[in-house]
Amino acid sequence: MELTGAEITIRCLQEEGVEYVFGYPGGAVLFIYDELFKQEQVKHVLVRHEQAAVHAADGYARSTDKVGVALVTSGPGVTNAVTGIATAYLDSIPMVVISGQVPTSFIGEDAFQEVDAVGITRPCVKHNFLVKDAKDIASTLKKAFYLAKSGRPGPVLVDIPKDVSNQKAEYSYPATVSIRSYNPQVQGDIGQIKRAAQMLLEAKRPMIYAGGGVILSDASKQLTELVRLLGAPCTNTLMGLGGFPASDKQFVGMLGMHGTYEANMGMQNCDVLLAVGARFDDRVIGNVAHFNSVPRKIIHIDIDPASISKRVKVDVSIVGDVAHVVSDLLAALNSSKQKPDAAALKGWWKQIDEWRGANSLVYKNSTELIKPQYVIETLHKITHGDAFVTSDVGQHQMWTAQYYKFNEPRRWINSGGLGTMGFGLPAAMGVQLAHPGATVACVTGEGSIQMNIQELSTCKQYNLPIKIIALNNRYLGMVRQWQEFFHGNRYSHSYMDALPDFVKLAEAYGHVGIKVEKPADVEGALKEAFARKDDLVFLDFRTDSTENVYPMVPGGKGLSEVILAEDL
Amino acid sequence: MRHIISLLMENESGALSRVAGLFSARGYNIESLNVAPTEDPTMSRMTIVTSGSDDVIEQINKQLNKLVDVVTVMDLTDGDHIERELMLVKVRADGADREELKRMTDIFRGRIIDVTDKTYTIELTGTGYKLDRFLQAIEPGLILETVRTGASGIGRGDRILSL
């Protein structure tokens, strides 16, 4: 059957079961948009900026186990998408971005709206393609979806020149795909898994450190079983929150720069550390030399061989998909006659409970000023801990990670690796579309929200009843905090002057806005907002402008060199 | 330490830039790099000479393997291997120098492949070390132009890099 490249593109999306495409039209993608128009199976969501299209596709992917899809035009369409693509890349989010390109005969001539999309995105995609002939579109898109989802997931860009989208070619969607140079390892090595099991059974002070790989691999059930079987404390990275239930007594909170005292001390004092789908990044383990200064055995499970021994040398490495490896590890533990050392664990927990006693997340509430932590705790209470929560980047992100106790995976949606301000609202759109009827909150700040505030218009068009929880402290709070701690209180350009009236702004977009200035009104306002099931409500919380995020491991310091709130 | 990394990759436009981009993005050294298609026209063979600590070399190998266009990677310096580089040198060959340069070329088992009344163009293959020594052996003022390919390498005996 002969079809145009544009028809083939849409057919492929249908074959892949794509529900939503987030995009923005333009000259180079007109043929593709024309074909989108002629069908109903693949729904298109028109954003107001291409960055938001990619973040929305990203939020959609993170909150489901599906591949997010974005569609942008050539030139500025692609360059605007780059931040979104890099965000997805750093957090290993499965995504296919289709970009238009100038006609093949114009490529290289500095044509109108031409950029080298493949070149510009190369360092921030898992892979990318320039399709030069319509007959290659189907096989390329098949590969793109396969690459995006398999192995360590990531974004894949497919650049389609305008003439190719209008060129006719024979169409058949490939049933299978194989790439000779790409064979991600799914099953872990059984010998290594047995060694790991033995090491864990002999541990006196075991610790489990689980990251985003658990979420991406849908392995939280297996992880939870493993943690309970071993009787060990479990910490989650920022990306791993929800991978192990926060309400479980074996959960010691998030670790890292703003992790709990007990999690960080546990990392530093354990004798066997099991890292599951986590990559020992700088915000997580702090100073590498300090981290390595204590003797402990490390077992590392990761699907990406390049993540192993990149920053920290490990004793047992297991390359494979987390869900498969943890299942095999459970089997190895269950078939062993040996049981975890109950007496040693008892002593270890006594030590952990002592660290817990430091109560590192304590804050002094106020009747005068709204404490941001209190807003998040109340948000947790009002939503019964069951909402999808997206965030932007900064202090509000850390407070949400600390105080919203995530019990389930794929509920916490944030830009961990790249730290992209402007992520929260468009990501929430993707989440809400993926889960119509679900409660979706976007925790943000007055700085971050302004980086993609135009999406309030998209939310109106598609009736997305997101609840925006803006912790408005009139500062770029995390910048202000670092300036207070490390730059002699010189608040260089961290003050957000000339803020808009967010209530009026929300209303101008056709939404509901509520300003909250007193602690006593926090709960009522949240209740009112969440009772408005069909409305987007913008909650402008005027919070204490000098509140800091504690605990804090300053940059370059070790995990036990922590600043606690009470130290100051 | 110096390593020679040899790899097979898809013979596709952009594949080279993925490798070059990886090295620059992650701050790895490239001493030399060469690439050409193999007997299988869908594949290219690349030889990269790099240097770094064991940890860095391990990461380079892993990161190269991670590139979707890269089919297989081998660190030749992990075992017995042969290394060769081609150099073309254009020298001023006048009067007494003419005979001296001819003799030096013979000593180094090079060949003169182009002759004018004022110049010789000399072809020389060998290890990088040998080529360096040749350049040191002739008077610097006589060298007009030097072109080097960078090292290519292959494993000895049964050491084969293939699909």
Image: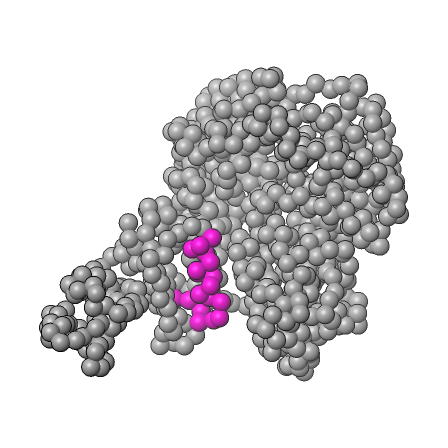
Among the 4 quarters of the image, the one containing residue A369: top right
Is A189 located above or below residue B19 in the figure?
Answer: above
Residue A173, horizontal then vertical, whole percent: 63, 73
Residue at 60% x, 78% y is A105
Is residue A461 found left or right of A555 in the rendered image?
Answer: right
Residue A556, horizontal then vertical, whole percent: 48, 32
Q: Quadrant of the C terminus of chain A?
A: top right
Q: Nearer the viewer, residue A367 or B87?
A: B87
Residue A549 visible in image: no
Residue A57, horizontal then vertical, whole percent: 69, 54
Q: Nearer the viewer, residue A57 or A23?
A: A23
Is A391 located above or below residue A84 in the figure?
Answer: above
Is A233 located above or below residue A353 in the figure?
Answer: below
Please identify the dominant SS of the magenta region: helix
Residue at 75% x, 69% y is A33
Is residue A209 found left or right of B51 in the rendered image?
Answer: right
Q: Residue furthest front?
A: B95
Residue at 61% x, 20% y is A565
Residue A227, horizontal then vertical, whole percent: 54, 34
| Residue A88 magenta-highlighted | no
- The residue range painted magenta reads B8-25
| Residue B12 magenta-highlighted | yes
Among the 4 quarters of the image, the one containing residue B79: bottom left
Residue at 44% x, 34% y is A288
